[in-house]
C-alpha cells in the first residue's frame, strides 16, 4: 500500500518513531495528548482518544504517578495467539485436513515453526511491511498457516473469494497491489487467466505466484501445460531464498506491528454489489474480535472447529486466529456437503462449526445414509450461523438433531460477527416454536463495540418497542479502519460517527435487535412495507421447501408485490403447485404479504459464503414484466417460470 493511500485508510499516522521506552514515557508525560498511532503526512489530532481520559489539563496523568510506556502498553495482535499456543499446547493438533488422502495433522509447535519459515520466505521474496499478499484457496491447511505467516512478515493478507471469475480476480489483484499470490492448485486455472489479464494492462505488474499442492486423492492435477512461473509452497518453506532476511530460516525475527492500528487484512465485500470494496482490518480489531467470538460462542480450551465457513470470508469470522487463542484444532473441509459435514463431525469429534443458513439447510435435509451419530461429549455441537436470518423451522429442526445454534450478525466492515443472540436460561421453558423465533433474532452487540437502531436521517435511536423500524449502526473497536483507496466511501459509511449497515431492524424491549430486511430488499406494495425475511420464514415452514428467497416484482396496481423463488427438497416431485404455496403462505401471513408469484428453481444464486444474490433474482423478476401488463397480454412469463393463479 502506498503511504498516502494507507493514511486515508488508517487515519493520521506520523513518520516519527520513538526509539526507546524511556523516550516514549517521557513523551507521554510531557505531551498534552497521546496520539495512539504514527501518522503519515500532515500531523493532525487523532480522532481516537483511548488514553485521553487518563490525563488532566496541562498533560498531567489522571492519577499522579501513572505512566503509559512499553512496560504497560504493547500493540495487540493475533500473532501472539500462535506464539502462546505453541508454548501451551505444543503437541496438540492444530490443523487437520478432512477427507481421503489427507496429509497428517500438524501440531501447534510444528505450525508455529512453519509459519515462521513462511514469513522468512516472504521476506526473501522482497515482501516488506504493509505489502499486500493475496490468497486464492479453498479451506485447506495452508490457508490457516497463511493467516499467521503473512502478518509475521509484517504484510497484509488479502483472502480472495474462491468463487471469483478470472476477470474479477484480476481487478482485485490490481486494486490491492498484491506483491505475491498463494494459489490453491485446484484454482490454478482461474489464477492463470487473472494474471494473463493483468499482464495485458499497461504498467501493471502481476504478483509472484506460490502454488499450494495438497495431498488429496480427489484434487485436480496441476495442468501439464502450465507456462506460469511459480514457487511451490512446501519447497518455498524449505528453501533459502537469496536476499531479504534469509529465506526460510527458522531464526527469522517476527515483524511485530509497531502499532496495533497497522493493517493486518484486506477483505473485499461479498460480491453482492457490482464493485466490491476493500475493507481494511487492523491488528487491534482482529485481536479483539477473535477473543469476542471465542468467548461469546462458548469455546472452551482446545475446541475442535470444523471449517464450513470460508476462510476468505472476514478471515473466517476471525476464528482462524481465535481457535489458536484456545489451542484448538482446525478441521479443514475443502468441499461442504451434508455427507462431508456429518463425516467430519463424527470422525474428528467436532465441538463447533459455523455457516450461513444454507449450511444449516444441508444438515437438516441430509438423507439417512449421509447422517452419522454426533460425538458423545455430553454437549451438543455448537453451530454459529450468520449471513442471513435463519428460518425458525430450520432452527427447530437443528435443535431436534442435537445441534446448538447460536445466531450472529455482522458485516465485512465489522470483522464479521458484531452481534450475538445470547441465550437466556428462562427461555428454555418456552415452546419450541417460540424458542426458534427468539433464536432468529440478531441479538445484542459483540464485546468491543456498540450497536444501535437509529433513524438514519435524525440519528435518533428508535423506541425499543419491537415495531419502530430503523437502520442498524455500529461503532467501536471492531469497526473497519476504512475502505482501501476510497476515502469518500469511508466517509459516507461512517457519517454521523456510526458505521451504517443498510439493514433495517427493530429493537425489542429487552434490547435484542431483529433485522427485518436490507433497506434495498424491502418491498413497498401499495404503500405498505413488506419484509422479505418474514415472507421467506413462512415459505420455509412448508414441508416441501428446501430454500426460498423473495424479491419484489413490478405490479401495475400495487407498485410491486412479493415474488418467491423456491427450491424444493430432493425427492419432491412436481406435485407442489404455485397455488398450494401461495395458499400456504396466506394461512400464515396477512394477505398482502403473501407471494403473488412463485418460481420453482433448481438452485438459488449464491455467493461463496451462502448469501442469496438477490440482485440477480430482482433482475429476473423485473424481466418477467409487470403483473398487470402480463394479464393484459394474456400470457405467462417465458421459460420455466410459473405464476400462481390469484
Image (cartoon, rainbow, N blue to C red):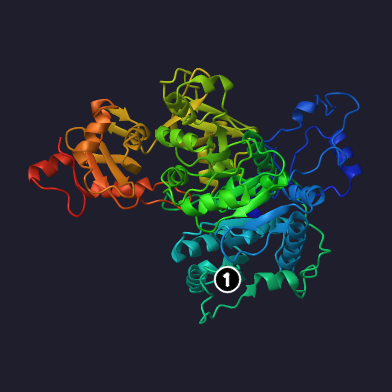
- Residue beneath disc 1: 205
- Can residue 503 be seen here? The reply is no
**Where in the figure is residue 382, as x and y percent of width and height?**
57, 39
Report the front residue among 613 and 360: 360
Horizontal side of 134 relative to 15 (left or right) equals left
**Where in the figure is residue 559, as x and y percent of width and height?**
22, 35
**Where in the figure is residue 165, as x and y percent of width and height?**
44, 63
Q: Residue at x 25, y 41 (%)?
A: 553
Number of numbered markers = 1
Q: Residue at x 48, y 48 (%)?
A: 371
Q: Residue at x 55, y 19 (%)?
A: 426
Report the front residue among 12 and 334: 334
Q: Is residue 577 above or below residue 435?
A: below
- At numbered mark 1, what does the secondary structure look like: helix, strand or loop? loop
The answer to which quarter of the image holds residue 141 is bottom right
- Can residue 122 be seen here? The reply is yes
Horizontal side of 116 relative to 563 (left or right) equals right
| The C terminus - image quarter | top left
Q: Is residue 160 above or below residue 411?
A: below
Amino acid at each position: 500500500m502506498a503511504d498516502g493511500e494507507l493514511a486515508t485508510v488508517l487515519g493520521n499516522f506520523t513518520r516519527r518513531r520513538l526509539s526507546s521506552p524511556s523516550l516514549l514515557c517521557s513523551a507521554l508525560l510531557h505531551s498534552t495528548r497521546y496520539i495512539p498511532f504514527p501518522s503519515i503526512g500532515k500531523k493532525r489530532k487523532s480522532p481516537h482518544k483511548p488514553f485521553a481520559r487518563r490525563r488532566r489539563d496541562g498533560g498531567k496523568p489522571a492519577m499522579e504517578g501513572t505512566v503509559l510506556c512499553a512496560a504497560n502498553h504493547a500493540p495487540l495482535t493475533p500473532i501472539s495467539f500462535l506464539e502462546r499456543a505453541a508454548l501451551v499446547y505444543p503437541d496438540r493438533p492444530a490443523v487437520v485436513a478432512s477427507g481421503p488422502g489427507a496429509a497428517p495433522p500438524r501440531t501447534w509447535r510444528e505450525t508455529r515453526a512453519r509459519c515462521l519459515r513462511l514469513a522468512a520466505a516472504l521476506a526473501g521474496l522482497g515482501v516488506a511491511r504493509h505489502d499486500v499478499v493475496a490468497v486464492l484457496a479453498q479451506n485447506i491447511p495452508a490457508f490457516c498457516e497463511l493467516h499467521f505467516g503473512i502478518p509475521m512478515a509484517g504484510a497484509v493478507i488479502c483472502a480472495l473469494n474462491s468463487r471469483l471469475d478470472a476477470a474479477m480476480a484480476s481487478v482485485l489483484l490490481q486494486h490491492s497491489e498484491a506483491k505475491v499470490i498463494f494459489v490453491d492448485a485446484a484454482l490454478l486455472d482461474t489464477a492463470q487467466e487473472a494474471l494473463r489479464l493483468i499482464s495485458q494492462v499497461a504498467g501493471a505488474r502481476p504478483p509472484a505466484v506460490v502454488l499450494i499442492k495438497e495431498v488429496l486423492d480427489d484434487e485436480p492435477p496441476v495442468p501439464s501445460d502450465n507456462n506460469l512461473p511459480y514457487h511451490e509452497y512446501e519447497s518455498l518453506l524449505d528453501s533459502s531464498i537469496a536476499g531479504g532476511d534469509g529465506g526460510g530460516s527458522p531464526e527469522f525475527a517476527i515483524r511485530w506491528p509497531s502499532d496495533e492500528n497497522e493493517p493486518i487484512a484486506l477483505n473485499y465485500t461479498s460480491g453482492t454489489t457490482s464493485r466490491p470494496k476493500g475493507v481494511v482490518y487492523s491488528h487491534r480489531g482482529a485481536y479483539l474480535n477473535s477473543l469476542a467470538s471465542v468467548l461469546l460462542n462458548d469455546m472452551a480450551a482446545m475446541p475442535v472447529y470444523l471449517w464450513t465457513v470460508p476462510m476468505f470470508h472476514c478471515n473466517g469470522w476471525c476464528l482462524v486466529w481465535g481457535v489458536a487463542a484456545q489451542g484448538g484444532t482446525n478441521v479443514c473441509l475443502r468441499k461442504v456437503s451434508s455427507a462431508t459435514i456429518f463425516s467430519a463431525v463424527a470422525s474428528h469429534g467436532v465441538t463447533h462449526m459455523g455457516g450461513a443458513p444454507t449450511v444449516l439447510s444441508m444438515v437438516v435435509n441430509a438423507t439417512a445414509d449421509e447422517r452419522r451419530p454426533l460425538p458423545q461429549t455430553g454437549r451438543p455441537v455448537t453451530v454459529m450461523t450468520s449471513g442471513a436470518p435463519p428460518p425458525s423451522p430450520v432452527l427447530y429442526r437443528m435443535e431436534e438433531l442435537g445441534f446448538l445454534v447460536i445466531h450472529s450478525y455482522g458485516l465485512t466492515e465489522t470483522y464479521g460477527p458484531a452481534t450475538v443472540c445470547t441465550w437466556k436460561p428462562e427461555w428454555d421453558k418456552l415452546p419450541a416454536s417460540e424458542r426458534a423465533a427468539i433464536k432468529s433474532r440478531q441479538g445484542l452487540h459483540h464485546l468491543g463495540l456498540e450497536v444501535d437502531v437509529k433513524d438514519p436521517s435524525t440519528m435518533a435511536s428508535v423506541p425499543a418497542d419491537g415495531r419502530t423500524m430503523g437502520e442498524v449502526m455500529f461503532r467501536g473497536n471492531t469497526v473497519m479502519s476504512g475502505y482501501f483507496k476510497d476515502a469518500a466511501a469511508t466517509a459516507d459509511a461512517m457519517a454521523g460517527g456510526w458505521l451504517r449497515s443498510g439493514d433495517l431492524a427493530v429493537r425489542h424491549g429487552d434490547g435484542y435487535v431483529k433485522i427485518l430486511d436490507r433497506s434495498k430488499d424491502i418491498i413497498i406494495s401499495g404503500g405498505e412495507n413488506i419484509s422479505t425475511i418474514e415472507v421467506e420464514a413462512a415459505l420455509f415452514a412448508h414441508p416441501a421447501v428446501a430454500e426460498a428467497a423473495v424479491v419484489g416484482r413490478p405490479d401495475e396496481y400495487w407498485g410491486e408485490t412479493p415474488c418467491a423463488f423456491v427450491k424444493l427438497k430432493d425427492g419432491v416431485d412436481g406435485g407442489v403447485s404455485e397455488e398450494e404455496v401461495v395458499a400456504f403462505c396466506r394461512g400464515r401471513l396477512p394477505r398482502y404479504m403473501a407471494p403473488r408469484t412463485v418460481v420453482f428453481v433448481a438452485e438459488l444464486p449464491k455467493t461463496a459464503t451462502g448469501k442469496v444474490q438477490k440482485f440477480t433474482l430482482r433482475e429476473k423478476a423485473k424481466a418477467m414484466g409487470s403483473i398487470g401488463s402480463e394479464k393484459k397480454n394474456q400470457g405467462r412469463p417465458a421459460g420455466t417460470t410459473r405464476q400462481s393463479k390469484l
